[in-house]
Image (cartoon, grey):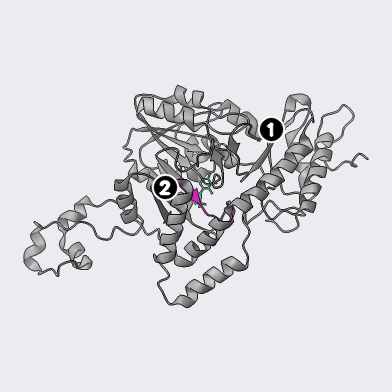
C-alpha cells in the first residue's frame, strides 16, 4: 500500500518512460514471434557481457532462476546446504521438499551478508552447497567464501536479486561463484515489465540443461535403437516425431517447465540495461545523502561499505544501537507518522513457519535476530526520489532519532516538534 504516503517505499524500483513504451510498441507491431525471439537473444547477450559469465539465460522470475540453479546442482536427499537467514524467502524456497537439510549461518551486523566464519562453522561432511545473497546490493565477501568452497568442494549460488549494478573489487556479482540468479521484479534495480529473471554461469553442459528445462525440454535426444521404431518411419530431423518415438529418451528426461521470457519483456530489459548505470548512480546519491545526514549522531550507523566496493543500494539499511537509548520501534512509528514509508526487511528465514517445521527456531542466528528485532530500519531508496524528497527524509530522520531516545521525561512515540 503506497497511497497516502508522502514518501512511498517504492513499488517500482526503476524508472520507465517513453523508451520502454516504444520498445514494447515495436515488438507488438513487428509481426514477429512474441516468445523466444531476437529480443531475448539480444538481452541475454548484453547481460552476459555485463556480468562476464559465459552464459546468461532469461527466465520468468528470480525465483525460477533459483529453482533451476537448485536443479542443476543435483542435490540429493540428505545433502546439506548452508544458507543465509537474512534474505527474502525465495532465496531458499527451492530447497524445500527435496529432502535436503538447511543449516543457517549467521551474518555480519553491518553488511547483513553471510559471515564467512559462521559459514565455516556450519560445514560438515554432508555439506554440498552455499546459498549467499549480496544483501541490499552490497556484494558478499566472495573471496573468503570461494576459498572455503574450494577447500571443501562446495558449490556456491549467488542470489543477485539486489546486486545488479554493484561491483566487488572491479568484478561483477553473478560471475563470482558457480551460478548467479537475478530478478527483474517490479521493485528491483531494473525491471522487465514487472516480472522476469536471469541465470548466469560458465558451464556449457548447464547451458544445454537449463535451456531445455526452461522450455519443456524440446529436442530431447532421439535414441536410434528405440523399440517403437518399428511402428513409424520417422522423417529425419522432425522434432515432434523424435519425441513421440523415443520411449527411452523419456527416461532420460528431467522435470522441465516453461519459463520463457516474452519478447516484449526482453525488449524492455534491453532498454533498462542501458540505463542501469544512471539508475544505480541515483540510488548511490540518495544513499550518500542519508549517510551524511546521520554522520556523527551517536548510536546510529548505516550499511555503507568502505574500500573497493560499489554498493548498488537496492536497499538502504539504517541501524540504531538500543544501548544508546534509541528505540527502533519508536523511530519506525515516528517516520511513518510523518509520511515516510519505512520497512523492516526481511523477517529472519529460520523463524518462518516452514523452516521452524524443519526444526529451526529462535536463538539459532543471534546476530540476525538482534539486528531484525532491535536495530534495523529500511528507508525509501530508489531512483524516482526527488531532491526535495531526500531532503525531507534527512530532516525527519534526524528529528525522529532525537524523538526516539528514551528519556526519563518522555511519553510514548509520535512526532515531536522538530528542534529549530
Ligand atoms: C526479489 C527477490 C527474489 C525473487 O525474485 P522474483 O523475481 O520476485 O521471483 C529472490 N531473492 C531475493 C533476495 C529477492 O529480493
* Residue 333 rendering spot, x and y as whole percentages: 77, 42
- Residue 41 belongs to magenta span: no
Residue lying at 90% horizontally and 29% vertically, measured from the top left: 409
User: Magenta region: which residues?
Assistant: 181-188
Q: Secondary structure at mark 2?
A: strand
Residue 97 vertical placement versus 28 (above, below): above
- Direction from residue 311 to residue 380 in the image, left or right: right
The majority secondary structure of the magenta stretch comes to loop
Residue 114 in view here: yes
Front one among 8 and 268: 268
* Residue 50 rendering spot, x and y as whole percentages: 48, 49
- Direction from residue 300 to residue 224 in the image, left or right: left
* Residue 248 rendering spot, x and y as whole percentages: 15, 54
Residue lying at 72% horizontally and 49% vertically, measured from the top left: 341
User: Mark 2 — residue?
Assistant: 200
* N-term-proximal mark, 2 vs 1: 2
Amino acid at each position: 500500500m503506497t497511497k497516502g504516503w508522502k514518501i512511498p517505499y517504492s513499488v517500482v524500483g526503476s524508472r520507465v518512460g517513453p523508451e520502454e513504451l516504444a520498445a514494447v510498441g515495436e515488438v507488438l507491431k513487428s509481426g514477429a514471434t512474441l516468445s523466444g525471439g531476437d529480443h531475448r537473444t539480444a538481452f541475454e547477450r548484453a547481460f552476459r557481457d555485463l556480468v562476464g559469465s559465459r552464459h546468461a539465460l532469461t527466465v520468468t522470475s528470480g525465483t525460477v532462476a533459483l529453482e533451476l540453479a537448485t536443479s542443476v546442482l543435483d542435490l540429493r536427499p540428505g545433502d546439506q546446504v548452508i544458507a543465509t537467514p537474512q534474505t527474502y524467502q525465495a532465496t531458499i524456497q527451492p530447497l524445500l521438499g527435496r529432502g535436503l537439510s538447511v543449516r543457517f549461518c549467521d551474518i555480519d551486523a553491518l553488511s547483513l551478508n553471510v559471515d564467512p566464519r559462521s559459514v565455516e562453522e556450519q560445514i560438515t561432511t554432508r555439506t554440498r552447497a552455499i546459498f549467499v545473497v549480496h544483501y541490499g546490493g552490497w556484494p558478499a565477501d566472495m573471496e573468503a567464501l570461494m576459498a572455503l568452497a574450494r577447500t571443501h568442494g562446495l558449490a556456491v549460488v549467488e542470489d543477485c536479486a539486489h546486486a545488479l549494478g554493484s561491483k566487488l573489487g572491479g568484478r561483477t556479482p553473478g560471475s563470482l561463484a558457480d551460478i548467479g540468479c537475478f530478478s527483474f521484479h517490479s521493485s528491483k534495480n531494473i525491471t522487465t515489465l514487472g516480472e522476469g529473471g536471469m541465470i548466469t554461469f560458465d558451464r556449457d553442459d548447464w547451458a544445454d540443461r537449463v535451456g531445455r528445462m526452461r522450455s519443456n525440454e524440446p529436442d530431447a535426444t532421439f535414441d536410434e535403437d528405440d523399440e517403437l521404431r518399428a511402428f513409424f518411419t520417422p522423417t529425419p530431423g522432425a522434432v515432434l516425431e523424435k519425441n513421440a518415438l523415443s520411449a527411452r529418451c523419456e527416461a532420460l528426461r528431467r522435470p522441465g517447465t516453461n519459463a520463457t521470457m516474452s519478447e516484449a519483456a526482453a525488449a524492455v530489459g534491453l532498454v533498462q540495461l542501458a540505463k542501469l548505470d544512471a539508475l544505480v548512480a541515483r540510488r548511490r546519491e540518495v544513499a550518500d545523502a542519508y549517510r551524511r545526514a546521520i554522520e556523527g549522531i551517536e548510536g546510529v550507523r548505516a550499511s555503507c561499505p568502505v574500500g573497493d566496493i560499489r554498493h548498488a543500494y537496492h536497499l538502504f539499511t539504517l541501524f540504531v544501537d538500543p544501548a544508546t537509548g534509541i528505540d527502533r520501534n519508536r523511530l519506525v512509528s515516528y517516520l511513518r507518522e510523518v509520511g515516510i514509508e519505512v520497512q523492516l526487511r526481511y523477517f529472519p528465514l529460520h523463524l518462518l513457519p516452514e523452516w521452524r517445521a524443519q526444526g529451526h527456531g529462535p536463538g539459532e542466528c543471534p546476530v540476525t535476530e538482534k539486528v531484525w528485532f532491535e536495530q534495523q530500519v529500511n528507508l525509501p531508496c530508489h531512483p524516482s526520489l526527488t531532491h526535495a524528497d531526500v531532503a525531507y527524509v534527512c530532516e525527519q530522520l534526524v528529528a525522529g532519532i532525537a524523538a526516539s531516545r528514551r528519556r526519563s521525561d518522555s511519553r510514548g512515540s509520535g512526532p515531536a516538534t522538530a528542534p529549530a
